Image (cartoon, rainbow, N blue to C red):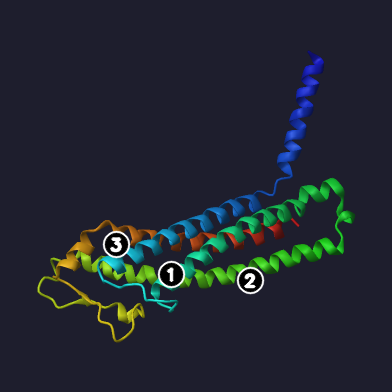
Amino acid sequence: MTSFFFLLSGCMECCLKCLGGIPYPSLIATILLYAGVALFCGCGHEALSGTVTILQNYFEVIRGPGDGLDVFTIIDIIKYVIYGIASAFFVYGILLMVEGFFTSGAIKDLYGDFKITTCGRCVSAWFIMLTYIFMLAWLGVTAFTSLPVFMYFNIWTICQNTTVLEGASLCLDPRQFGVVPIGEEKTVCAGSEKFYKMCESNELDMTFHLFVCALAGAGAAVIAMGNNNQGVALFK
């Protein structure tokens, strides 16, 4: 019985030592980073698909012939960029977590400060610098994502106030946003059948809220990268 208690005590001590070596700020920031990037990529991809549906069904915008650069080609390019972002940040999040673990204070106490070489410090500084660069890039992504949120918010607000706008000659023109060339008129005006169908459809409401979720995910990724750098610095 005594040996069992000694064994249990040794296991608990080992577990506590392992738990003490986990860089919790870096762990939380990595989880938040994954959640933010996943929210941005998943919701952004579906919101772009919803945008294509709205343009085709209600504004009657068609895909241009050949390999011309139209709005649908741009949306396809952005989707492929989202695939790349998801893959890159999956790997980058693992690297940040590993770097945060090996620079934690518990690892230094276990192996001693003399084990931390100049090369290790340079690698750590490089990760911090790279994370700040990515954070600035994600600030740009967040600002870019706010544009469709603002556009859809205006459309969604107009649809929610259709009774107030009864008799008003208010039209939605995709040419204002560069979606279609200036020479093509694809307007949808309040009071028309297409306008009411678009407002009553699930595509508009779903696409708007998906863009809002994508914006929230981009903001969460920015916060996660900032906290990850602070967590690594705190544990050094």
Please report whichever mark, 3 or 1, sits nearer to the chain's N-terminal start: 1
In terms of secondary structure, where does tag 3 sit?
Answer: helix
Left or right position of 87 against 14: left
Quadrant of the rendered image containing residue 84:
bottom right
Residue most toward the right?
Answer: 114
Q: Residue reaching furthest front?
A: 66
Q: Is residue 9 left or right of residue 173?
A: right
Mark carried by residue 204: 3
* Residue topped by disc 1: 75
Residues at discs 3 and 1 in contact (Cβ within 8 Å)? no
Observer-nearest of 18 and 173: 173
Circle 3 residues within 10 Å: few <14, some 14–19, many ≥20: many
Residue 179, image quadrant: bottom left
**Sequence-first disc among 3 and 2:** 2
* Residue at horizontal 43 percent and vertical 78 percent from the top: 69
In the foreground, 228 or 41 = 41
176 vs 18: above or below: below
Q: Foreground: 127 or 14?
A: 127
Q: Which residue is mark 2?
A: 133
Give the label, 3 or 1, closer to the camera: 1
- Residue in view at x 41 percent, y 59 percent: 46
> Disc 3 marks which amino acid?
Leu
Q: Position of residue 206 (x, y in %)?
A: 33, 57
Question: In the shown orientation, is residue 124 left or right of residue 166?
Answer: right
Q: Secondary structure at mark 1?
A: helix
Q: CA distance from mark 2 to mark 1?
A: 25 Å
